[in-house]
Image: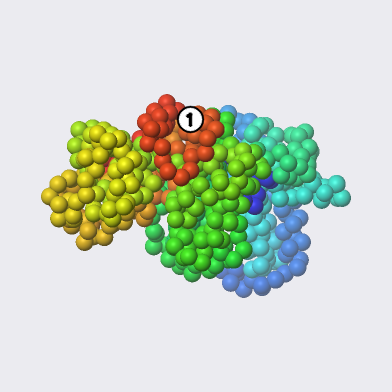
Amino acid sequence: MLFLNRARQINQRGVDFKQIDNEWNWDNFILLQAAIASMGYYIFPCSESLPRWNTKGFIALQILHVAVSEPLYYVLHRHFHRNKYLFIHYHSLHHSSPVPQIPTAGHATLLEHIVLSAIVAIPILGSSIIGYGSISLIYGYILMFDFLRCLGHCNVEIIPHRWFETFPFLRYLLYTPTYHSLHHTEKDSNFCLFMPLFDALGNTLNSKSWEDHKKITSASGENVRVPDFVFLAHVVDVTASMHPPFVFRSLASLPYSPKLFMLPFWPLAFSAMFALWAWSKTFLISFYWLRGRLHQTWAVPRYGFQYFLPFAQTGINKQIEDAILRADRLGVKVLSLAALNKNESLNGGGTLFVDKHPNLKVRVVHGNTCTAAVILNELPKDVKEVFLTGATSKLGRAIALYLCRKRVRVLMLTLSTERFQKIQKEAPIDCQNYLVQVTKYQAAQHSKTWIVGKWITPREQNWAPPGTHFHQFVVPPILHFRRDCTYGDLAAMRLPDDVEGLGICEYTMDRGVVHACHAGGVVHLLEGWTHHEVGAIDVDKIDLVWEAALKHGFKPVSSLRNRQISS
């Protein structure tokens, strides 16, 4: 949960897709230990008669752990590092993860898991053999062992340095996440299991261990890097609220889609929605690095349906405003509004905040210029006619005006005279004839290129002639109803190849792909533009933004790749 622990993170790099994939089967050791425990249960039938508690057993277990397990692990672990063959063929897998995480603790080879299982078993079997075993001893030791292993790999320093100042000897009895992170970065020190005492005795204790620990815990929050760019998103729905990496890291690394195993957690997620509504403020979800700049995604704690509740809109705007002002205080350079956070009826596409706070240093952008550019560049180069829904929206207006300037006929469902004339007057005089109002029956007889900016029902999709392709910029996307037609994705772009630390998919987007408005905000930052991009889209800047995006390494994710006509 980055919103809680970002200030105490040891390694500030992000966990990327490669590391997540490498650690995908981190839980293999649980299966192995379950199998070993099952065999032990049948090999030693006396385990059925073990008491629930035995005080002497816990004393024996602690003695065996300190006298046998700790030094044995230390010697073997150091040998795995210093023996070139063992390190290359076995232990290097564990160290292949650049950023230690809790799953990293279980990311190892079968040989290492067997060795570790034996080390775990020694105190349990020893206590039981001398007659002091108990059920609580077995479960208690294994759970504590796993907890301490996870603690060392969690990459968040939670142990106060004052403990060690008050009780200096404690630093030799309990390692810290900082202590073990040094082992992962420098590799030739801090080999202990849980007790640094054995590194001190073996002369392998890293001299920076206590200094780094104190620096992180005492300066918590002071040395945290301020983001250069913030993408201000919101929760889509209850099921999608289980997609963040702090819920299921593996699930978050894949494009969002509902999973059957998520169903039992739905009531908990539903309850969390009310808690967020009542108490939460905008919080940090994820981050990545691009060319030395820190990019973060913040989430407004509101769900999609709440944006359409009239009584909730004031509170939502307050959340967005607070996030903008916070970003301004921190020194964020660009804040990009996502999805419904820039809804025209909610805040005029961000105009409300810029007008209210004219001295903002942070640039507020809706990114829709880039969205328009992506949609327009997905159209066939030889297109002569398109059918457009949602022509009066920010994006629809800009797309209509751009296309008519290119001498492309734009067919629109009949609007009120006033609304149609307003759009028509914005077009050059010699292009106004390219904006045409039609009925739904006329639409069915004409264009096979539809641009959907206003949600259409399956019944309305039937107006389209067979072979139509639906481009779209509507949220949520329209249903794929027609089998004789094809459907494009929402406008999106692939991030540049040099992005670092990215390990989460943006909603339904593929890995490394972001919504076009997100890309537009990043381009705004990389170009160093100093204007706010709010309100109506400047049609003259569509090509400028597109060229800038390509220049910086963004790649169009053409919806045409999904054109597969079902027979």
Q: Mark 1 is on which residue type?
A: Asp
- On the question of residue 98 being in view, the answer is no
Residue 201: x, y in percent?
Answer: 79, 38
Query: Callout 1: few (<14), some (14-19), or many (20+) C-alpha neighbours within 10 Å?
Result: few
| Residue shown at the point (18%, 55%) measured from the top left | 439
| Residue shown at the point (25%, 39%) measured from the top left | 432
Q: Is residue 202 above or below residue 241?
A: above
Would you name the residue on which mark 1 appears?
498
| Residue shown at the point (44%, 35%) measured from the top left | 495
- Name the one closer to the observer, 367 or 359: 359
Q: Is residue 207 above or below residue 246?
A: above
Residue 96: x, y in percent?
Answer: 54, 36
Q: In this view, does 431 lie above or below 282?
A: above
Residue 177: x, y in percent?
Answer: 68, 45
- Name the one closer to the observer, 373 or 345: 345
Residue 352: x, y in percent?
Answer: 53, 50
Q: What element carries label 1?
A: loop
| Residue shown at the point (66%, 72%) measured from the top left | 52
Image-based side of 207 in relation to 150, left or right? right
- Name the one closer to the observer, 489 or 43: 489
- How many tags in the picture? 1
- On the question of residue 343 being in view, the answer is yes
Image-based side of 165 in relation to 519, left or right? right
Image-based side of 473 in relation to 82, left or right? left
Res 259 quadrant in image: bottom left
